[in-house]
Image (spheres, rainbow, N blue to C red):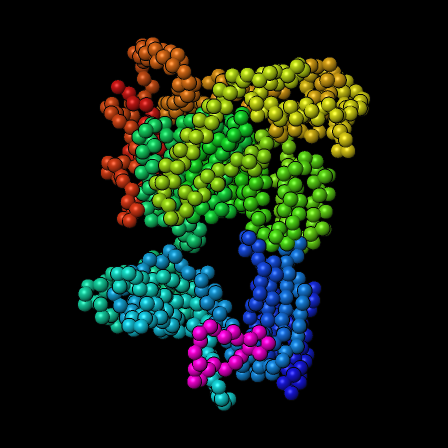
Amino acid sequence: MANITASTSLTTGENRNPEWMPSVNMLFDSENDAYEFYGTYAENVGFFVRRSTLWTTSKNIVTRRTFVCSREGFREKKKGAKEVKSPRPETRIGCQACMTIRLTSNGKYRVTEFISNHNHPLATSTSIQMLRAKKLRRKARAARVDLVDDSVKTPEFETEDEAYEFYSMYAGRMGFTVRRASMTVTAENVITRRMFVCSKEGFRERKKGAKRVKKPRPETRTGCPACMIIRITTSGKYHVSEFVTCHNHSLATPSNDFSVPRFAENGALDDELDMTDGLMMTPISTDNSVSIQARTSHDLGIHSVDSKCSLRSKRIKSVQVGDIGATLEYLQKMQDDSPSFFYTIQVDEVDNMTNFFWTDAKSVVDFSYFGDVLCFDTSYKYFGYGRPFALFVGLNHHKQLVIFGSALLYDESKKSYKWLFDAFKTAMGGKQPKTILTDRNALQVEALAEMWPGIVHRFCVWHIYQNALEHLSQAFHGSKTLESDFSRCLFDYDNEEEFLVAWKVMLEIYDLKDNQWLASLFEEREKWALVYGREAFYGDMKSIQLKDNLTSELKKHLSPETELLCFYEHYVRLLDDRRSAEVLSDAQASQSARKLPSMRVLRQAANAYTPAAFKMFEREFELYMDCMLYSCGNVGTISEYKVTIDEKPSHFVKFDSLDNSITCSCKKFQFIGIPCHHVLKVLDSRNIKDLPPEYVLKRWRKDAKVEAFSGSYEFPFDGDPQTSSAKRYSYLCRIFNIVASRAAKSLDTFAFVENQSDILMEQVEQLLRTRAPEMPPFITSPCERAQSSVEPIVNGGFRHDRVNQVNFLGPANGFLSTRISHPTICWGQFPAGPPEQ
């Protein structure tokens, strides 16, 4: 009889909602989607669902999941359990109804098994209503977790009643009422957790046996997520663990009539009222949030919050306690140790420090040599550093990553990115790269277009790969070969036709044609695919990032559990280690004892290139030996050739006999800086046994860091004596930094420069005595010590205090400044100009 009832109910449910009937081979985007679908089907039919067995990978990706009826299986008897007088009723009776899903190669879940038969009566309509109410409450709890506002500051409370009165005051000012909800108590009847909610939280449950009435009470509960949760601390006080300000309903007119709390007698009322005023500044999200915010602010006499500022405050990342102080202490120490150390700080509209950028003299010198390609590394977004630490990195002539600058970005607005790129350009003496690689970030794209309009902007393929690990994680675990095929599309192809075919085949094989992330990525392929934009220098950055990544070395030191000062110590060691490795590579390149190749062109390349660059050239030379050359005719002094190798696509090379210039359709020389095997084949056919000097790129040579000062920087002379003096000073600082870095390599060069400095100083003094100064001196008295831009704030020696973090205020223009420095820049000992006697 039970089976007949179940079958009848099931048939009725299916006829009512045929679209909710599961079937084998149905596809779902995620495991949760499948669960929601099966749960909706269960509601319509009349039974309860629970998750059962599952299979996961080492990275916690669900590959198989079974959803069952709540009466599946049997209750297990616990060992040693005693018999009770009134045992719980048996609810599990071995029901076979279930639905099983498996992860497919395209990252979706397919239904592989569906059993619809039950061995028990199905639920009644009343039970279904209870099920739906329970489901709505569960969804409300899940939504509340994502709505917690961490920026709200609340006091600690002595008792649970004080917390309730505080939240009631806040609610009265905002326009809603409060009630006590769930709580947790100990055996001694001590409340350890209490939840205060908006009166419209949850949903009204229908009472069993309740009769229908002609005029039912209006529904007042809407599942509002607004709440405040307190928990007891070890000191016995209560602190707020969760505070949700969002409402899903319109707020009432705020009330100004408050009953005085009991703790007002202790003098705490003013503090609590001030705190509720502070909470009022937090935007409240409702269906008509704009009008409600404007009304409540006007009624309560509170300064209106600018919409731009409110949006920006949401973008600001949370700052760990003590991070600001630790950063300022590090920056001050570095500038005390090296007057040429550069840093700048950005503050927001309320003078809170949001972003930091810094670099040192060695990084500036490195950028003058290897600043043709720059990567703005924001890997913290993918690796969960805990702190928003970003790097400006490049590639030296040994194919090693070089750090040009560092930044802490607690605010990632377009304005902040513009500030950061401008600060970097200023630190590098006005020089900017030819090519910059960044993440696929619309704000960065807009900021770069405005600040550096003349450079080539590409998306970093390494960042795209890290992003794919998140967006395609299910698909990668559903197939053993998809990840490698996707990687080849990113890193391996240098021919457009091969790339397009491989991408199309990948979408078809793994059924990814409907994947929105891949579709948007393909639309922007000209910004990242290595087969496009090869006219701009790239420097083989992708292969270095795959082998040498700074993220693994920095990740554990940037976790919130580690003090930021410890990270800065590790960062300095990392910087020193990498610079030592570069010095060692320089020594090995200049003192290489390996036997030179016998072939003339290889011998020339080995003498000119660093070992790392020579390996790239040697690979091209090996390929050149297998090339086939076909003449396509001559036009004046220009000869055209078709070069093929094996079954790969052909490339065309043009050679001009007038000036021996040569170009190839693969554009490898423009892209990487090494002549391709097609070019080498044509040069050999023309009996040119030596590489033309213009095709041995200076940045890959052993002497890449030996150059004249006049070519390092562009010095903009103008007619203003005051600004000209400051620019001349900064320009000379960079020149002498280069001299110092070269002279420090040996005792002989050090002694020579030290001796010549006295002679140079005497000549400078003679010129100054014979010529009148262009302007009055900036500083009328000699400066005895390096000036620090944070000294006026920290009053002579700030020290980091992790517990009591200091709030710093900047000037109204939004930047930190000193009495002698440019308001946005802290460079060297005298940022505005040199001291004069």
Q: Residue 559, can we see it?
A: yes
Q: Is residue 520 magenta?
A: no
Residue at 47% x, 73% y is 78
Q: Which residues are magenta?
A: 73-94
**Residue 668 image position (x, y, % from top left):** 65, 28
The correct choice, above or below, for 120 with respect to 730 in the image is below
In this rendering, does residue 694 appear at all?
A: no
Helix, strand or loop for the magenta stretch, by majority: loop
Which residue is rendered at x = 69% and y = 47% of the image? Answer: 506
Quick check: 577 left or right of 122?
left
* Percent of width and height locating residue 123: 57, 81
Q: Position of residue 223 (x, y in %)?
A: 46, 71
* Quarter the C terminus occupies: top left
The foreground one among 124 and 661 is 124
Residue 305 position (above or below residue 171): above
Residue at far front of view: 80
Q: Is residue 83 magenta?
A: yes
User: Does residue 685 sit above or below 68 in this rendering?
Assistant: above
Residue at 78% from the left image edge and 23% from the top image edge: 629
How many callouts does the rendering have? 0
Residue at 48 percent across and 88 percent down: it is 210
